[in-house]
Amino acid sequence: MTNLPGIVITGASGRMGQMLIKTVQDSDKARLVGVVERPGHDWIGRDVGTCMGGAAVGVAVSDDPLELFAHAQAVIDFTSPAATVGFAALAAQARAVHVIGTTGLSDEDLLKINAAARHAPIIRAGNMSLGVNLLVQLTKTVAAALDEDFDIEVIEAHHNKKVDAPSGTALMLGEAAAEGRGVSLDNVADRGRDGITGAREQGHIGFSAIRGGDIVGEHDVLFAAAGERIVLRHVATDRAIFARGALKAALWGQAQGPGEYDMMDVLGL
């Protein structure tokens, strides 16, 4: 077992952190060598298995990521933009694969991540599931086939704890639609409507965000014209799909050189 790639999970106490820990623990292709939480968290120093309400697994929660990254082959990170930027620099220093599922990253954050990718592989995606990445490809294809008589709307729904909107997946879909039409999303995105907005501008790509309950993730891409509508849809009912995709990316990244990659690369799409 010691020859299996060692994985570190950041944000251990979060929903995705715990799912990632379980996924790595259950895998016969990787081993859990460390978990990270922010300084001062009450899990620090305790066995992560017991923190999660189960049996001890022999891995203590740490607030020293650099020490853990130095002994790992990959880091899987679904945390916050500020934390992810810091982890990117540390993972690059350790020459570890950095799998990033964090969303809400700014242009400045992305520049820092790009700099880190010059030293180690970074795999970043707004969504790690196979189904969503296929939906992205379909969205690009359909958008390229239809003219501007078809309005494009991206509608997404998530749980009430999600802090960013539109979701990273919704933006992936919007980028795919814009690419299919040969335009820049920055020039055609409508990300908020309120009050007397006037008629919808032809060629724009609209976004709507729903937040409620424990919705894992639902994404629709609506192509609407006079007399007809086409709807492409993906519904996630279990966050394990994201964890499995992230682990697949971490394993795939072992054979890659420094650079930025996404799930399209991992899945061969």
Image: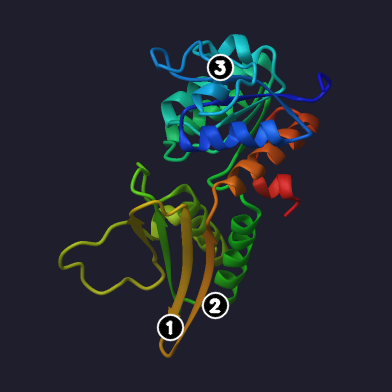
Query: Disc number at residue 146?
Result: 2
Numbered disc in front, either 3 or 1: 3
- Residue 191's place in the image compared with 88, above or below, is below
Residue positioned most to the front: 55
| Marks 2 & 1, CB-CB < 8 Å contact | yes
Question: Which image quarter holds the N terminus?
Answer: top right
Question: Which image quarter holds the C terminus?
Answer: bottom right
* Mark 1 crowdedness (10 Å alpha carbons): few <14, some 14-19, many ≥20: some
**Image x and y of residue 156, in percent:** 42, 59
Amino acid carrying label 2: it is Leu
Q: Does 151 sit left or right of 89 as displayed?
A: left
Identity of the residue drawn at 15% across and 68% down: 196
Residue placed most toward the observer, 186 or 35: 35
Amino acid carrying label 3: it is Asp
Query: Disc number at residue 225?
Result: 1
Q: What element carries label 3?
A: loop
